[in-house]
Image (tube, rainbow, N blue to C red):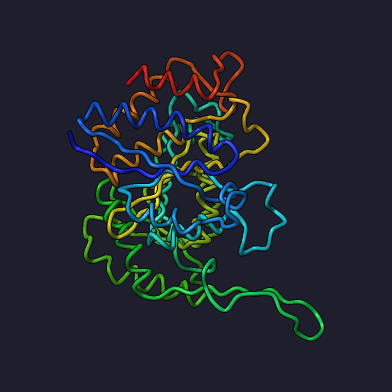
Amino acid sequence: MNSKNVLVLPGDGIGQEVVAPAIAVMDVAAKQEGCEITVTQGLVGGVAIDACGDPLPAETLELAKAADAVLLGGVGGPKWDNLPMASRPEKGLLGLRQGLGLFANLRPALLSAPLASASSLKPELVAGLDILIIRELTGGIYFGEPRGIETRDNERVGFNTMVYSEHEIERIARSGFELASKRNKRLCSVDKANVLEVSQLWREVVNSIASDYPDVELSHMYVDNAAMQLVREPKQFDVIVTTNMFGDILSDVAAMLTGSLGMLPSASLSASGTGLYEPVHGTAPDIAGKDLANPLATILSVGMMFRYSLDLPAAADSIDRAVAEVLAEGYRTADIAGPNDDVVGCRTMGELVIERL
């Protein structure tokens, strides 16, 4: 039997709850395809701070580098909000991204037909929605130097630097072109080239490699217009590729088109194929420990793991199909429930998916 090693980092808040059913689903789907998954668990984020004073212990990073893929539940919470910036749980996630060289974040915005009424937009605008946002993850304003807060002319000034090199832009753009070529062959590059020099370079580099992908239709859009168009006419988009900060914002806009962050998975990929997979919904400390969390985004993240890192696309298809069947039968967690739906908890939702598998 084929074998794979997966590092599981439950993290904080509801991370502990949503990861448990996802592991169970992962085990069943893998075995159906003749693969044995060896799961190792580690600490990251707030629980790592509490245990050893470091949001990313060296042992966790070494385990991540040795794994075929990493599954993360989520990091952060108000308990750690007063810590210095360099010591907060989110630094553990940023450290993982840097340490593993995870430069491409893939965030699909898919609207399952049974959930069309959950969107804040009219059903006809979002029915059949299928957008993939590719966010550059290791450069840009979140990592640029110089940065800081200092005193100038007797007042404090905060500053950050948005920096991109040509090779960083080309690397993420090629990811966009390649994924678009496997979908509907449309790539929209989002920037702010009318006012930012770094965006002017971004656009030049993206244009320079477009001829390598003649089957993909390339367009450009300013980020403010892109945000408006996502709400006005979201189905015009197929694949969007953009910078770290713009992608952070636009992917959350696209997420809410589907009605709930609890349904959306994500993948962060390296050049070697090692990936970090996580739901986009955060740690929701207000419902942690109450069996109210929606595990479907984490379960769908496992599907992305099978597709992009573990080379088991049939297992990914099985998970996607099982989730669709559970939703079609009317089962919902509280965050996506309507007045006539059958509301179930986190554990039960995971069991229902396994039954469909």
160 relative to 27 in the view: left or right? right
In this view, which residue lies farthest toward the front? 52
Quadrant (top left, top right, bottom left, bottom right) of the C terminus: top left
Q: Residue at x 19, y 37 (%)?
A: 2
Total labels: the figure holds 0
In this view, which residue lies farthest toward the bottom? 153
Above-or-below relation of 254 to 113: below
Quadrant (top left, top right, bottom left, bottom right) of the N terminus: top left
The quarter of the displayed image where residue 23 is located:
top left
Q: Residue at x 24, y 37 (%)?
A: 313
Above-or-below relation of 111 to 72: above
Q: Nearer the viewer, residue 72 or 182?
A: 72
Q: Position of residue 262 (x, y in %)?
A: 53, 34
Q: Position of residue 12 (x, y in %)?
A: 58, 42
Q: Nearer the viewer, residue 106 or 233?
A: 106
Q: Residue at x 36, y 75 (%)?
A: 166
Q: Position of residue 88 (x, y in %)?
A: 62, 57
The quarter of the displayed image where residue 241 is located:
bottom left
194 relative to 212 in the view: left or right? right
In this view, which residue lies farthest toward the left? 1
301 relative to 50 in the view: left or right? left
Residue 235 at least partly seen: no
Q: Position of residue 250 (x, y in %)?
A: 52, 52
Q: Residue at x 59, y 49 (%)?
A: 51
Above-or-below relation of 244 to 23: below
Residue 77 at least partly seen: yes
